[in-house]
Amino acid sequence: MTAFFTAVVIFDGWLDGSLTASIADDKPIQGTVLCILVALLAIPAQLELSKLSAAKNLKIFIPVSIIASILFATYRYWQQEYWHQFLVIRPETYLIFLSVFVMLSLLLYQYISYGTSGVLANCGANYFSILYLGLLSSFIVAMRLEFGLWAMLMFVFVVKSADIGAYAIGTSFGKHKFSPKISPSKSWEGMAGAVGTAVIVAIGFAVCCDIMVWWLAAIFGLCFAFIGQIGDLVESMMKRDAEQKDSSNNVPGFGGVLDIIDSLLVAAPFGYLFFMLRFR
C-alpha cells in the first residue's frame, strides 16, 4: 500500500509538472490523481462508518453522505485558478453553501425515508460522518496543492510510520497502558516507539527533500506522532461504542479503510496548519 500510494502521488506530480522545481513545468490544474484517490476512498470509508452506526441504530444516508463527503474532500481542488473561469466562488462561500445544502438534503432524505423517527440522531450522525471523512480529508488535498507533493508525502509517511512504530514497540515491550478505556492494547512504550520512528522519518524527509531544517522536522515528528495516535483513538472510540473490533474486514491484516486512514484524518488539519506557518 505504501509503494502504491507513493507511486500514485509521484505519477500525479509527473503529470501536472509539480515533480520538478521549475514553475514553467507546472500545469494549470494540480493534484488530479490524488483528488480522485481521496474521493474513491471516501466511498468504502462511508460504508464502513455506516455499519458502525447501524450497530447503534443510527441510519447513514449513503447516497447523500458519499456525495457530500466527496464534495467536501475535493473542494480545494475546484478552487484552483484554472477553474475560476467556470466556478466564480470563493472557498469560504463554497463551504458555507455546501454545508447548508447538505443539511437540507439530510433533512429531506430523513423525511422521505424515515419520517420523524430519529431525526436528530440520524441527521447528526450523517453530518458527523461527512465532516469526519470529507472535511478532514480536504486538508490532505490542500497540503498537496499549496505546499507540494513532497511536503504532503512527508506528512503521510510521518503519521503512518508512527503507527508502525507504535505497533512494533507496543506489541513487543508494551506494559504501561496509554488509554485503557478506549484502546487497551495501546501503551506508553508504543507511544515512545511512535515518536522515535516519526522523528527519524521526518528528519529523513526534511533533509533529503529540503522541506525544512532538521530540528524543525524533529518537532514535526514529535507532534504528529502524538496527534496521529489521537486520531487512531478517535476511531477506536467509535468502534468500542459500536462493540466492533475493526471497521470492516476489507483490508486483510488491517481491518477496514477507516482503520488505515483514521490517524491521517485527525492529523490533516494540524499538518496543514504546520506547513502554513512554516512556509509563510
Image (cartoon, rainbow, N blue to C red):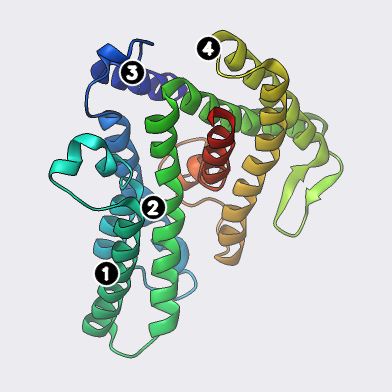
Residue at 35% from the left image edge and 14% from the top image edge: 19
Per the model, the C-alpha gap separating discs 3 and 4 is: 14 Å
Identify the mark at residue 269; answer none if there is no mark.
none
Sequence-wise, the earlier of marks 4 and 2 is: 2
Tell me the residue that label 4 is attached to. Answer: 209
* Circle 3: residue type: Ser
Left-right relation of 158 to 25: right
Disc number lying in front (4 or 2): 4
Q: Residues within 10 Å of mark 2 (few under 14, many from 20)?
A: many
Q: Is residue 48 above or below residue 218?
A: below
Left-right relation of 54 to 17: right
* Circle 2: residue type: Gly
Identify the mark at residue 101; answer none if there is no mark.
1
Tell me the residue that label 3 is attached to. Answer: 18
Residue situated in front as seen by the camera: 215 or 116:
215
Q: Residues within 10 Å of mark 4 (few under 14, many from 20)?
A: few
Tell me the residue that label 2 is attached to. Answer: 134
Sequence-wise, the earlier of marks 2 and 1 is: 1
Sequence-wise, the earlier of marks 3 and 4 is: 3
Q: Residues within 10 Å of mark 1 (few under 14, many from 20)?
A: few
Per the model, the C-alpha gap separating discs 4 and 2 is: 29 Å
Q: Position of residue 260 (x, y in %)?
A: 50, 39
Left-right relation of 63 to 274: left
Q: Is residue 239 above or below residue 16?
A: below
* Circle 1: residue type: Phe
Sequence-wise, the earlier of marks 2 and 3 is: 3
